[in-house]
Image (cartoon, rainbow, N blue to C red):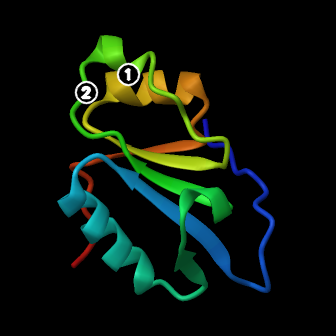
Amino acid sequence: MTRNPKIPLTAGLVLVAVIAADPISAAGLTAVLDDVDGVQVVDAKAAEAVVWDVGHVNERRALTLPVPEQPTLALVRDSATAADVLAAGAKGVMLRTDVGEG
């Protein structure tokens, strides 16, 4: 099932925060998002949406992870973690192994 939340836009610009425990992952996600027209990476407090790299957490810990209040796309390692973060309130998930054309 797909859920498409309505995200208020600021003058055509989507303010997105990157949350990741791994600094390399955070830098990579920020670099990718910086190349997307209409997206500006900002601090979590100013964000309208969040890209969150959940990383490698065990299933028990995934059940207790706090999902940000803003609409959140979570990058997860497997379908079990995906189900957990969706149940916790994430608006979408993407497997960390999914790679687009490039």
Is the residue 88 above or below the residue 51 in the image? Answer: above
SS class, disc 1 = helix
Horizontal side, residue 38 vs residue 58: left or right: right
Is the residue 60 above or below the residue 13 in the image? Answer: above
SS class, disc 2 = loop
Residue 62 % position (x, y): 37, 22
- From the viewer's side, name the closer residue of 57 and 101: 57
Horizontal side, residue 86 vs residue 71: left or right: left
Which picture quadrant has residue 47? bottom right
> Badges 1 and 2: C-beta atoms under 8 Å apart?
yes
Amino acid under label 2?
Val
Residue at point 23% right, 58% down?
Answer: 23
Which picture quadrant has residue 12? bottom right
Q: Which residue is mark 1?
A: 62
Label 1 and label 2: CA atoms lie apart by: 6 Å
Residue at point 43% right, 49% down?
Answer: 52
Residue 30 % position (x, y): 37, 72
Amino acid under label 1?
Ala
Q: Which residue is mark 2?
A: 57
